[in-house]
Image (cartoon, grey):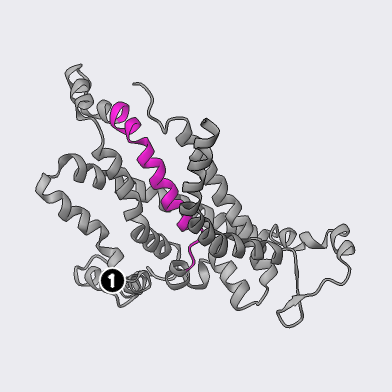
């Protein structure tokens, strides 16, 4: 009887699940497989894929790993390290800015103002990310808004070099990714049982102790989700670094883009893409492992 019930349930579920798997297979798994195969190929003289005449020779000689071996060159490792630390700093800044914002909206703001404040957090998504990045170019350039205000206030004697450096990249990344940190933390704070905060206060704990020992541990799932949502896009970002950083701040995303468009070395670009994807998947697996362990919701 149980087997019959299971079979009937499978017959009902599969028609609902198949469209999802079809979309994932066509638009995700298939392109991913193509990129994976291309990463073991070789570049031809004019940028095309070089055909492999002797497959076993190509396999036994280790030539199929040449693109991955090239990615270990100190030049490309330096670009990877720069991408990693910029993504880390971006995530840290978003957390330092986003947590107080989410805390105020969830716990301190008046109820009739919460929707307005949340709308202000989401408003940037109504405009193209590319247009918003161009706006930062106008703000940070030598004749831009920041330098003009500082010069008029007499705080500086000559315009500051705020554009086409890593500072500008960090500003653009923090601005673009900040909502992805605020919203998960706000959702965690909104579900927080405030009676626990009152109990901590009644037991004599000062506000800072209540915050660090009660509020932060209970909102840790939102913090981890925000860190993942900010770090992963920042690690593969190329628009912000291309427009605001110029040639001085090449990140992994720019390297991959240049291999496919300028250098026309698709195998090498595919290899770097897969290495970046491996880092992202490792982070997602770590987050999944963390969520299965309870996501920080331990007894206090």
Left or right: 167, with 260 as reference point: left
Instruction: Say which quarter of the image contains residue 30.
Output: bottom right
| Quarter of the picture holding the C terminus | top left
Residue 263 lies, in percent from the top left, at 65, 77
Taking the magenta stretch, the answer to whether it contains residue 215 is yes
Residue occupying image coordinates x 23% and y 30%: 193
- The foreground one among 31 and 253 is 31
| Residue farthest to the bottom, as pictured | 46
Residue 130 lies, in percent from the top left, at 38, 72
Left or right: 19, with 226 as reference point: right
Q: Is residue 75 visible?
A: no
Residue 89 lies, in percent from the top left, at 44, 51
Q: Secondary structure at mark 1?
A: helix
- The foreground one among 153 and 45 is 45
Residue 187 lies, in percent from the top left, at 28, 43
In this rendering, the count of numbered labels is 1
Taking the magenta stretch, the answer to whether it contains residue 30 is no
Q: Main secondary structure of the magenta part?
A: helix
Residue occupying image coordinates x 39% and y 70%: 163
| Residue tagged 1 | 147
- The foreground one among 191 and 159 is 191
Give the residues in magenta. 212-238
Left or right: 85, with 53 as reference point: left
Q: Is residue 48 visible?
A: yes
Residue occupying image coordinates x 25% and y 73%: 148
Depicted 142 relative to depicted 19: above or below: below
Left or right: 182, with 25 as reference point: left
Tag 1: Cα neighbours inside 10 Å, few (<14), some, or many (≥20)?
many
| Residue farthest to the top, as pictured | 203
Residue occupying image coordinates x 59% and y 77%: 261
Depicted 285 relative to depicted 133: above or below: above
């Amino acid at each position: 009887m149980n087997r019959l019930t299971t079979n009937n349930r499978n017959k009902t579920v599969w028609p609902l699940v198949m469209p999802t798997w079809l979309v994932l297979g066509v638009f995700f798994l298939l392109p991913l497989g193509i990129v994976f195969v291309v990463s073991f190929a070789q570049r031809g003289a004019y940028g095309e894929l070089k055909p492999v005449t002797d497959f076993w020779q190509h396999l036994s000689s280790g030539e199929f790993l040449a693109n991955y071996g090239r990615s270990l060159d100190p030049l490309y490792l330096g670009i990877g390290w720069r991408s990693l630390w910029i993504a880390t700093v971006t995530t840290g800044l978003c957390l330092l800015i986003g947590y107080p914002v989410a805390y105020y909206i969830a716990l301190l703001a008046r109820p009739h103002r919460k929707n307005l404040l949340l709308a202000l957090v989401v408003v940037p998504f109504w405009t193209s990310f590319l247009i918003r990045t161009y706006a930062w170019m106008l703000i940070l350039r030598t004749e831009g808004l920041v330098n003009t205000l500082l010069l008029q206030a007499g705080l500086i004697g000559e315009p500051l070099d705020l554009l086409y450096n890593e500072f500008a990249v960090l500003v653009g990344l923090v601005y673009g990714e900040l909502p992805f940190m605020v919203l998960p933390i706000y959702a965690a704070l909104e579900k927080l049982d405030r009676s626990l905060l009152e109990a901590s206060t009644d037991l004599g704990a000062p506000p800072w102790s209540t915050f660090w020992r009660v509020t932060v541990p209970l909102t840790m799932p939102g913090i981890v989700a925000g860190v993942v949502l900010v770090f992963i896009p920042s690690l593969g970002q190329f628009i912000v670094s291309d427009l605001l950083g110029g040639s001085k701040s090449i990140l992994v995303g720019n390297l991959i883009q240049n291999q496919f468009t300028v250098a026309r070395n698709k195998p090498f670009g595919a290899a770097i893409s897969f290495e970046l994807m491996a880092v992202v998947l490792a982070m997602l697996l770590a987050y999944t492992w963390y969520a299965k362990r309870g996501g920080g919701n331990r007894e206090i």
